[in-house]
Amino acid sequence: MKKKKNIAGRFLVLLKPYLFLSMALFLVITSISTVDAFFTYLSKIIIDQGIVAGNKQVVSDTLRLYGCIVIGQALLVFGLISLSGNIGERINRDLRKKMFLHLQKLSVSFYSRTPLGEIMSRVTSDSSKISELLSWGFVDSCWSGINIIVTMIFMFRINWELASFVLLLLPFMLLAAIFFQKRIIKHYRRSREVNSDMTRIYSENISGIKTIKALVREKKNLDGFNVKVGEMYKASYRAAWYSAFFLPVIQIIGSLGLGFVLWYGGTRSPETATGMTIGSIQAFVSYLFFMLWPIQELSRVFASMQNALAASERVFALLDQKVEIQDLPDARECPEIKDSIVFDHVDFSYTDKEMVLENFCLEIKQGTTIALVGATGAGKSTIINLVARFYEPGKGQILFDNEDYRYYTMASIQSKTGMVLQDPHLFNGTIRDNIIYSRLDASDEETMAAARGARVTDFLGDLEKGLDFEVGEGGTHLSFGQRQLVCIARILLANPEILIMDEATSSIDVRTENLIQQAIEKVTKQRTSIIIAHRLSTIINADVIHYLEKGRVVESGSHEDLIRKKGKYYQLYQHMELTEEVV
Amino acid sequence: MNKQKESKIKSLIKMFGLLNGFRGMFFLAIVSLSLAALIKSASFIYLRFILDEVFGNPVLLENIVFYCLFFILFLLGESVLSVVQKRTAARSAEGLTKKLRSRLFGHLQNLSFRYYDNAESGDILERVTSDVDNLNTFFNSQATEIGRIVALVVFNFISLLYLQPGMAFLALAFIPLVVGISIYFFKRITQGYKRYQEIEAEVSVVLHENITANRLVRAFNQQKFEEKKFTEKINDKFRQGIRIMLMHACYWPVTDLICFGQIIMVLLVGSRWALGGEMTIGSYIAVTAIVAQMVWPVRNVGRIFIEASHALVSFDRVETLLNEKPEVQGQEENGEAHEDIRGNLELVNVSFGYREDQSVLSDVSVKIKAGEKVALVGPTGCGKTSLVNLIPRFYEPKSGYILLDGKMLNDYPVNTLRHQIGIVEQEPFLFSCSLRENITYGVHRAVDDDEVIAAAEKAQIHDVIMKFNQAYDTLVGEKGVTLSGGQKQRIAIARTILKNPALLILDDATSSVDMETEQRIKKALFALMKGKTSFIIAHRVETVMRADRILVLDKGYLVQVGTHEELIKENGLYKTIFHKQLEGFEKTKFLLRRAV
């Protein structure tokens, strides 16, 4: 209950900048409902006081009024749509912006534990659901509520006894409507679920077609798929079934009222003093029909409310996500590192369960290149994550020239580090856009120099547009190795003090491989470099090699030292030599 | 233009052909919606009867309850018919979609690789999902919706003719105008929405990039830049949203004005006639009610037309997919069993290209004995993969032929042939079901747990699987665990061990695995190859050296055949490749020597 209140409060916060617009919207809705009901009332006047009474004057006067109101109504409808649309679009924009800003502040750990699709759907579809609820949901529920109230008022004005009878019927109609809507939505949702299952199966079958054919699974897969199709049929059919019944049931309840009106009106014939005139009966009938629609709308809003509330809970949860790594209040700019980066008895774990690093010590001298080698899970990536301050040590500290790096601002640390990740990520855009990503104000000459340094220019000749070649979404128009070269060019342009690199393990053709090797040699020169190394040449060229095992450095030294030692590294080396690629 | 229209009508007729098998149902839907419209019209005439005849007649008035009940009966009848209509429409629409989906799925699985090579998977996916959905909604709602509007207009018009002929034409006056505006507006608005969705997709792309590259953004301190990118996109979206909103904000009031204009006209003329006694009060009320029934639904005609035209486009897309020819099946029906394939393979002058004008393999001839292990070596693009793709008949040779145990490959039914071939790819494809199901994916018989475990043990993956919480029931993919490349490969090996084929095709690249894993994969592969004719697309020295024979391919030609020892002596491509490799070693060997 408290949670609901909380959400309502947060809705108000979202609406706050548009409070004035919302109030205007409310007024517009009220006027529209009143005018709608008034139309029917005018028809009644035309019939009773005009036609039945034989008064031409009343008829033409009323019709003139009718015409004026129609124009007013059209303006009101214009106001309704533009106000509501404006509020909806604006809230949606605000919300998305807010979420995006927050996402920029969140630490890397948030991203590694939250699936991509989940974040995406919160920012896109969930936020739309909220803005829809606060704009059109607001309109629909206000309009329906007000419409029912206004209609009832007009009914009471015409004949209070009959109106009371209708008032009695009203809750039943609403309940019936909600009953049906809930079920329709339930089955509809189920059909959407099955639908997404089907899409998944389809896409799996398309991408796995070779395996399917090789394993001769066609028939079995079709059988499996047919089960899903059957489920889909059932769910959609049920939803259709309920929605087929929905309106008729309300109509039947409504027509009970209608029959009563006719009977009542009939027995108290128009001539009797307390009885109803023909116009009144006609108005009553129209009013009754009028109410069916708002009831339908209201039940729809109620039934879908749950969905929107769930969406808002997800959105607010994202906005409430705590920023784990932040600058200390008195954080300073990080000065140039003169001497070393030191891991001083660092403990670290991603979850509470398993320690990745325990009492870990490591010294990285300024200007040297270190290679981290070892099996998966030895803690290599953790070390580079900590240096880049994507995570912070649980216990112990990381010292930049004997000062805990937590005293420095994140921005200053990150501007010192350059990263090349295992999966070279390129943004949708040109090669140039991607290179200057590390320094947006770089001149053309500088960009070109970086591209040349990273040997990007060596393959640019094959590409028609040179640096303006569009790399496509995720860089798919370039080969893996080429993407890596672009990432290295990016680093050369930024010229950071520290290079952090997670070497790719994928097989790359010989030519690009050579280019990469040269580029790496260039980028590591004169720079503190920490490399998770997989390639023999990188390892051998490193100043110091650290062999890691289960979060511990078990051997370190230069290649020659370690070979002489004939320990774990020696074994690894022999193995690597044997399995170097042929092609 | 005319031709275009003609073909549109043709595909419209074809689209209704989808109803095959559900015609009766659909017909019932149309009949009941027409009847419902008829009853609605009739109820107004009956209303006039009550108002004019019953109310004015004290004798009849005594039976008012009866007349009222009768009126309710009208409404009930209409309700029942609308239920019937929706039900039958749903039945036929859902039924035909079910049939279509199942047909499409089966068809997709039978399409040849040639088709998949040229088609984009996103496009195929869209055809089988959203295009089919469009067809579903067409038959579920648009087709009947149009029917309903037409029936309402027609029957109400007839009722008006009966009540007051003059009024009937007056009431129709503005309807064409509204239809015209409606179609124009909905055309525009659909374009607007399309753009809106495109922008929304662009927003998603920026967001997606930002999330996947979250480390990069932080490492380069580009949060501000990213914010700017995103803000620009959502501002675009906002502007487009407002544009669409304004279109709506104009359309609805304008048509309001027209429709109300129509109603006022009827009221004006109607009240004149009623005052002048040319029309009874009952007729007046009935006429005004009927006009409202005719005018308002017409505003949606544009929407329905546009949606229906989308369905037509979707139908064409689905139809094109269905018309793609499935792959050649071979003599499937002769039922001959080929259980005893030994694995003697002979390629005779085989040439192949993915396109007519292209030549990937040229004149390859080679004989491979049953049980032989053959390594394929050569630079990227030399035709290694294409060669092995011919064996399970994923593609057919352009010329030349392949013999299996002395019999033409084409004489084997495709399925029989593929049952005898096992493939382990570099990046094996796993399905999002349990690990057990993935391992037993290729066997078409009941397999007990012991057998699965034995295969997994041989493939060196059993202890990895046991580490997962749900062991063999662990799901793979989004809802379950993500496996590393090496683990996937071992699952695929287990799958192939269980399948126990006579012929093997392996891609030995073991990318991104550490030393220990690699050793285990190797062990698993050797266990698998025992006694089977094996093709290995070789990447590593070790594998090449262990093969019985090596086929060296260059630009589609088979340039060398022999054992490692033989080939290393020849002056050829093999020697060059091998020496290039050695060069790399030399450097390290030198270091090694210096170090020791």
Image: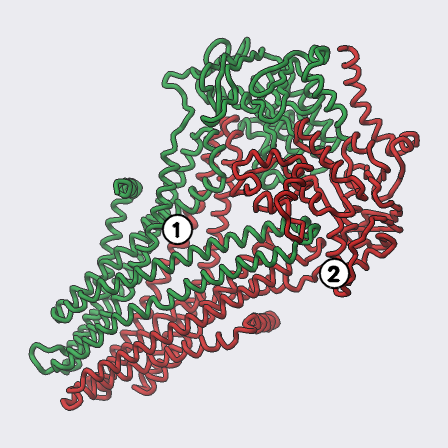
Q: Height in image: A232 above or below B479?
A: below
The answer to whether B51 appears left or right of B217 in the picture is: left
Q: Residue at x 68, y 37 (%)?
A: B459
What kind of residue is marked 1? Answer: Ile
What kind of residue is marked 2? Answer: Gln
Q: Colour of chain B?
A: red
Label 1 sits on residue:
B242
User: Tag 1's secondary structure?
Assistant: helix
Q: Height in image: A528 above or below A95?
A: above
Chain letter for the residue marked with disc 2 in the picture: B
Which quadrant: the N terminus of chain A? top left
Q: Position of residue A3 (x, y in %)?
A: 28, 40
**Could you tell me if residue A367 is visible in this image?**
yes
Q: Nearer the viewer, residue B498 or B246?
A: B498
Q: How many marks?
A: 2
Label 2 sits on residue:
B329
Q: Colour of chain A?
A: green
Q: Position of residue B401 (x, y in %)?
A: 86, 54
Q: Nearer the viewer, residue A18 or B90?
A: B90
Chain letter for the residue marked with disc 1 in the picture: B
The answer to whether A42 appears left or right of B511 in the picture is: left
